[in-house]
Image (cartoon, rainbow, N blue to C red):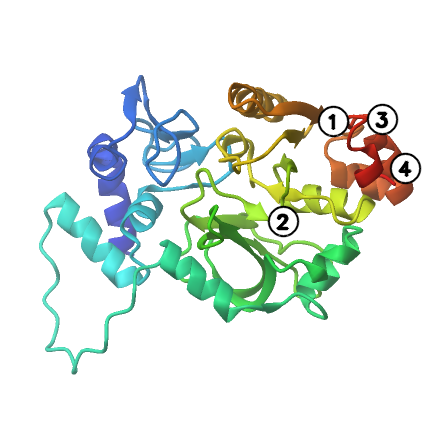
Amino acid sequence: MYSETEDLIRALAENAEGVCRAYLPAGRREGSYWIVGDLQNNPGRSLFVRLTGPASGPGAAGKFTDGATGEHGDLLDIIRERTGISRFPDLLAEARAHLGRPQPVLPDPPVPKKAKAPGGTPAAAARLFAASVPVAGTLADTYLRSRGLAQGSTIGALRFHPKCWHRDEGQTRSIPRPALIAAVTDGAGAVQGVHRTWLASDGQGKAAVETQRRAMGHLLGNAVRLTPHDDILVVGEGIETMLSLIEAVPGLPVWAALSSGHLGAVLLPEGLQRLYIAIDRDPAGRGAAERLSARALDAGIAVRVLEPRLGDFNDDLRAYGKEALRQHLAGQIGPEDRHRLVG
């Protein structure tokens, strides 16, 4: 059976380099891939778009993967993220226009409704966060507690949305699912993006979908500011990882950068004297820590790296408990901060 959507995806894949040059112009071709920093078209080498390959299946042309965030999809997803188009028919129209195809002849429309603001923008992220509710007593609270995180319900940067739209790769229809919503803010406290974690219907874990997490808006340089900073700050990757540090040491100044790529690029606040970088035990985490450390040291900020015993600090919390994690941290922080972080 003919499917125009599949036909458009196939045609875009056949012209994958042209799509990338139009919508991700900050990147460049290297061999069989178009390489760029991320879906926001920032310079870098994290996101790879395959330019050649079969029409479908493993290694298909037009598929992308972001090594820093784990995001993946096809060229329609790239066009949607770069244009902010949220309605699927409008997205198909944009793809037709790029390919030079005529638009279908439609009957005269009814009186047009007021146009919706595009999705994927800081404004759309702020609307989603505003439409969400506090975590306490929700499925997000249940989820966080299942990860040993009882303090999550007290964090203002975290909220819950019972029907947050979700679409996996290959799906043409979005489905509303419960989600933990985290505000990504800039130095002035303005919402620049949100991070969504879709949850199981009972809250006991993430949703059984291919893409369980996704961010939108302007992320580079910004962070989920879980608690306010002062002259010290602890920065790491995942939300659950950084909440684990708060669980062990309540009141710790903690931010979550969401990924190793964004950890290396987070903008540090003025007046910071000491920076602790909480890494995940993988090469990407260590590389991000090295990049952030170099920037901090250049700015005259003292740096220490906090390393978990297992894969990340949430693994440590669940395996060993809060007290053991507190003692583990006490052995890594500087003597000038032990009284305030561990006492």
Residue under the point 39% across and 35% down: 38
Residue labelled with disc 3: 331
Q: Position of residue 18 (x, y in %)?
A: 19, 33
Question: Does 245 sit left or right of 176 as displayed?
Answer: right
User: Which label lies toward us, 1 or 2?
Assistant: 2
Disc nearer the start of the sequence (2/4): 2
Secondary element under disc 2, as helix, strand or loop, is loop
Which mark is nearer the camera, 3 or 4?
A: 3
Q: Secondary structure at mark 1?
A: loop
Q: Amino acid at mark 1?
A: Glu
**Which of the pair 271/285 is nearer the observer?**
271
Work out how far the residue at label 2 is from the one at label 4, CA to CA, in angstroms: 25 Å
Which one is nearer the viewer's eye here, 155 or 282?
Answer: 155
Residue indicated by mark 4: 324
Can residue 289 be seen here? The reply is yes
Q: Mark 4 is on which residue type?
A: Ala
- Tell me whether circle 3 and circle 4 mark residues in contact (CB < 8 Å): no
C-alpha gap between disc 3 and disc 4: 11 Å
- Determine which of the numbered discs, if any, sits on residue 307 in the image: 1
Disc 3/disc 2 C-alpha distance (Å): 24 Å
Q: Position of residue 7 (x, y in %)?
A: 25, 48
Q: Residue at x 62, y 30 (%)?
A: 273
Quarter of the figure that contains the N terminus: bottom left
Q: Earlier in the sequence, mark 3 or mark 1?
A: 1
Residue under numbered circle 2: 228
Task: Decide which of tag 3 and tag 4 comes sooner along the chain.
Answer: 4
